Amino acid sequence: MLKQVQQDDFIIIKREVKMIIGIGVDVVEFQRMKTLLEKWNDIFLNKILTQKEIEYCVAKKNIVQHVAARFAAKEAVAKALSIGWSGSFRWKDVEITNDDSGKPSVVLHQELQKILSSKNIFLSLSHSESTIVAFVVIEG
């Protein structure tokens, strides 16, 4: 967090230093996600996404791209936490939302929310026609 301090004729910018707890990245191939959705559709959506995420994705022109982005983001969060699929990670405990400008963010639920309540989670999503990438940094 940046803090601006006025001192005489100078403005001093101070940054509160926090440690990076974890980073995670995931890449999803558009065609692979399209195939999964064609085969499993609602079963897959309901297993991976929250109701709010499903509503967001189905309202978009390219549902596959938006589902893939959320899938990649959740995978990147799991990697940043270094917990993998040990059983303590649940898909719906990580929710990806967007603000009015489209900026994505991570909302945590259940145990993850309790564990990471004092941490900052930064998420970046990007895509091409064939690939979706998610990058996560957890700071605290």
Image (cartoon, rainbow, N blue to C red):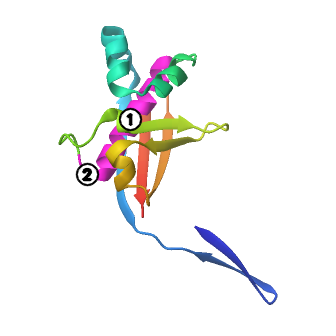
Task: Looking at the image, tell me whether mark 1 or mark 2 is earlier in sequence order.
Answer: 1
Of 112 and 68, nearer the camera is 112
Q: Secondary structure at mark 2?
A: loop
**Does the magenta portion include 68?**
yes
**Does the magenta portion include 123?**
no
Figure quadrant of the N terminus: bottom right
Q: CA distance from mark 1 to mark 2?
A: 15 Å
User: Around disc 2, counting alpha carbons within 10 Å, would you say few (fewer than 14), some (14 to 19), or many (20 or more)?
Assistant: some
Q: Amino acid at mark 1?
A: Ala
Give the main secondary structure of the magenta stretch: helix
The label shown at residue 72 is 1
Q: Position of residue 38 (x, y in %)?
A: 36, 9
Left/right of residue 79 with respect to residue 72 in the rendered view: left
> Which residue is painted at 43% across and 40% down in the image?
134
Q: Position of residue 14 (x, y in %)?
A: 61, 77
Q: Position of residue 40 (x, y in %)?
A: 31, 12
Is the residue 122 above or below the residue 85 in the image?
below
Q: Secondary structure at mark 1?
A: helix
Figure quadrant of the C terminus: bottom left
Q: Number of numbered discs present?
A: 2
Q: Position of residue 50 (x, y in %)?
A: 42, 28
The image quadrant of residue 19 is bottom left
Whether residue 130 appears in this view of the structure is no
The residue positioned farthest toward the right in the image shown = 9
Is the residue 95 above or below the residue 123 in the image?
above
Residue of label 2: 82
Q: Between tags 1 and 2, which lies in front? A: 2
> Which residue is painted at 48% across and 27% down in the image?
53
Q: Amino acid at mark 2?
A: Ser
Is the residue 49 above or below the residue 14 in the image?
above
Q: Which residues are magenta?
A: 63-83
The image quadrant of residue 91 is top left
